[in-house]
Amino acid sequence: MKLYFMPAVLLSMLIITSHTYSAEYRFVELGTFGGTTSNAYDINDFGQVAGLARTAEGYNHAFAYNSDIMTDLGTFGGTTSMAIGTNNSGKIVGYALTTEGYQQALLYESGTKTNLGTLGSHTSTAAAINNSGQIIGSSNTTDAAASSHAFLYYSGTMNDIGTLGGLTSLGYTISYANDINNNGQIVGYSLATIGQYHAYVYQGGTMSDLGTLGGNTSIAKAINDSGQIVGYSPNAGGNDRAFLYQGGIMSDLGTLGGTTSQAHNINSNGVIVGTSQTASGQTHAFLYDDGIMIDLNTFVDPSENFTLARATAINDNGDIVGYGINASGQTRGFILYNESNLNAVPEPATIILSLIGAVSLFIKRRMK
């Protein structure tokens, strides 16, 4: 019995070790412009962050955060603005209110704000920008119901990329764009049939329905340069679940022990971040890599008194942004700067060889 007990223990160690995720993060709680709230939505590979922060007067303003400095990007003359995406050139997109109170797509570049206009109505929002400067978002169209259509903006022109063809009860079509990769592939969601929105990928002039996880709807949030898509969709039980779509298959990523989860971003290494319900019913930010979903709060010192609730973006260095709740109960943006190599544990092959050697040595000694 003892001869076989040791290998069994070692096998258990191997299983546990192969599922170990090790990383070191430096936590930063973002401030505000005098108000109580801030949210971080995107981070580029140089650590520049885009988001919003509340002013002392109670208005949300878009910000750019770089080298510990938060810059108010202002508005188009109205009261509020929001920064949603940024690229590696430091260009930022989002929206801002005009003097007339209309919400319109914003491009911020080198200290200058540009109103990108609309698809013919009064309202638009820019959601993402790739490293080539292609911008995607959504805009109301000229129809009477002001239905929203996804757009691609490039070289000064905003183009409607269409819909999945579904109609509202009044006969109008709707689509939204959430992300664009450096290959020009766009993801978002569109009305596929009455009351049912489906995730899509748009490429080569064609919008393709990605289906669902068994429920009626799905939303694609992000796409990396390998074409891997993440988002969320209700399962057959009606609970939102984070998904990864690749190779024509939409896979449920599970949860942190609760019933619901949502994936919000994926980097070029295939590492996914989002939010999930825990077994105790709390909402926590997660990181998903190599088949494992990890609560990001395990990487934050408890003395910070900060709960990471939602991770919204991860760059190719493994830096993560999002928002959570601080010790005062206020919503604040956060940054987790990755200060180690992700998956900084021994390679599985190294572990296996070491354990095989240990097992062999143990057996030889027992046989003497």
Image (cartoon, rainbow, N blue to C red):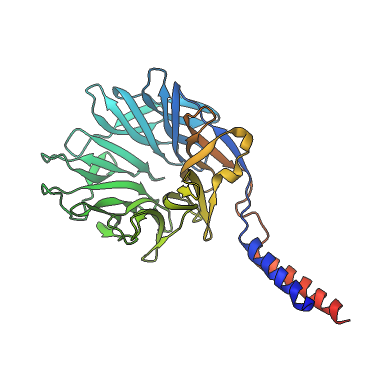
Image position, residue 365 (x, y; %): 86, 77
* Left or right: residue 89 compared with residue 361: left
State whether residue 315 appears in this view. Answer: no
Q: How many tags in the picture?
A: 0
**Closer-to-camera residue (88/42):** 42
Above or below, 105 against 295 in this view is above
Image position, residue 146 (x, y; %): 16, 39
Image position, residue 160 (x, y; %): 21, 46
**Closer-to-camera residue (117/243):** 243
Image position, residue 209 (x, y; %): 27, 59
**Closer-to-camera residue (117/16):** 16
For the C terminus, the quadrant is: bottom right
Farthest residue, direction right: 368
* Left or right: residue 113 compared with residue 165: right
For the N terminus, the quadrant is: bottom right
Farthest residue, direction top: 57
Q: Residue at x 22, y 34 (%)?
A: 123
Q: Residue at x 56, y 34 (%)?
A: 28
Q: Residue at x 12, y 49 (%)?
A: 169
Above or below, 14 against 108 in this view is below
Above or below, 106 against 231 in this view is above
State whether residue 123 appears in this view. Answer: yes
